[in-house]
């Protein structure tokens, strides 16, 4: 609906520009004897036409970029859905047509369960991205103990990726730190952030989490730092946009839909918080700072 309204606006703008151009030509003829008036009206109409053309060009460039992002998103989602389905089908066909030892069967079941989790995670991300756009959707706000919540997210991510002990380190917060928010939504935030940290940290992820009360505002600050491939300065703000994926470099080789950080930012902003990404450059890791209202 929003894109349709925008397109209608620029269509009307184009029609108005045509009318202005016609009026300019007619005025040039009618006001030929009045040089001063002609100059004034000519300058005004010319400025309006140039402004309209600039706006129209900006709109078209944005639409082209958005279309490219949509295409990239569809390709990513198709891959994320097709790959685990093909894998599950292959293992099921093997179990059906061949005699497999009990040990091998258990291995096949583990792989199929992992593929099912990957498939479910992709579907949940798409649904979550759709839900974040619902302005009327109400949050179930309550006091949430942030240390326990982050610990729960870390445990889930460690289990999902079969990470060894010590790969995710949680610094003990000083005291009982609570935030105001929807527990389920906030859990989604930290699972997504930790999933990203693992995905972009290579074979030996080292992730640290630190929580503290902000000394400058009534906020709780959660720092999530990894030893991954880092983020280029030009991409630090863009990575939170829907469908956005880094176009070049090692980050582009990672699988994903481009929705994770968009979902994270949407949920945090609905809670009245903020998120920021920092990195010293490619290959030097990343740090994400989440700020949430303190209870």
Image (spheres, rainbow, N blue to C red):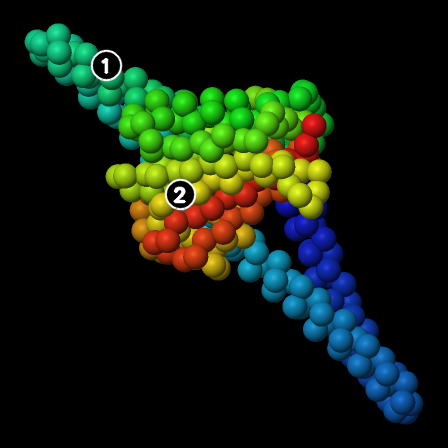
* C-alpha distance separating marks 2 and 1: 31 Å
- Report which residue position mark 2 lands on: 226
Q: On the image, which quarter does residue 267 sit in?
A: top right
* Left or right position of 295 against 257: right
Where does the image place residue 165, in percent across and percent down from the top left? 31, 27
Q: Nearer the viewer, residue 73 or 104?
A: 104
The tag on residue 208 is none
Circle 1 packing at 10 Å, graded few (<14), some (14-19), many (20+), is some
Residue found at the far front of this picture? 174
Q: Quadrant of the C terminus?
A: top right
Single out the mark in the foreground, 2 or 1.
2
Where does the image place residue 191, in percent across and percent down from the top left? 46, 29
Q: On the image, which quarter does residue 40 sit in?
A: bottom right
Helix, strand or loop for disc 1: helix
* Left or right position of 224 against 295: left
Residue drawn at the location 26% of the way across and 26% of the way down = 86
7 shown above or below 146: below
Q: Quadrant of the N terminus?
A: top right
Q: On the image, which quarter does residue 280 sit in?
A: bottom left
Chain-order first, disc 2 or disc 1: 1
Helix, strand or loop for disc 2: loop
Residue drawn at the location 66% of the way across and 51% of the way down = 7
Where does the image place residue 58, in percent across and percent down from the top left? 61, 62
Q: Examine the rendering and report whether any part of residue 228 can be seen.
A: yes
- Report which residue position mark 1 lands on: 109
């Amino acid at each position: 609906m929003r894109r349709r309204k925008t397109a209608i606006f620029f269509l009307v703008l184009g029609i108005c520009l045509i009318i202005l151009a016609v009026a300019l030509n007619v005025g040039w003829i009618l006001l030929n004897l009045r040089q001063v008036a002609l100059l004034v009206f000519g300058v005004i109409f010319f400025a309006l036409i140039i402004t309209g053309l600039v706006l129209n060009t900006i709109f078209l460039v944005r639409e082209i970029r958005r279309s490219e992002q949509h295409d990239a998103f569809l390709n990513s989602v198709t891959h994320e859905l097709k790959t685990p389905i093909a894998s599950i089908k292959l293992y099921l066909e093997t179990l059906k047509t061949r005699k497999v030892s009990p040990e091998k069967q258990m291995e096949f079941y583990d792989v199929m369960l992992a593929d099912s989790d990957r498939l479910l995670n992709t579907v949940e991300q798409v649904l979550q991205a759709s839900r974040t756009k619902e302005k009327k959707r109400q949050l179930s706000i309550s006091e949430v103990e942030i240390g326990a919540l982050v610990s729960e997210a870390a445990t889930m991510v460690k289990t999902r990726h079969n990470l060894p002990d010590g790969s995710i380190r949680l610094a003990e917060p000083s005291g009982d730190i609570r935030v105001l928010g929807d527990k389920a939504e906030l859990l989604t935030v930290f699972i997504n952030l930790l999933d990203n940290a693992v995905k972009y940290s290579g074979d030996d992820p080292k992730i640290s989490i630190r929580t503290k009360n902000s000394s400058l505002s009534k906020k709780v600050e959660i720092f999530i730092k990894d030893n991954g491939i880092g983020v280029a300065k030009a991409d630090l703000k863009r990575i939170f946009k829907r469908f956005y994926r880094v176009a070049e470099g090692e980050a582009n080789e990672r699988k994903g839909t481009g929705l994770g950080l968009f979902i994270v930012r949407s949920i945090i902003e609905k809670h009245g918080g903020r998120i920021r990404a920092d990195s010293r450059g490619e290959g030097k890791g990343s740090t994400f700072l989440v700020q949430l209202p303190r209870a």
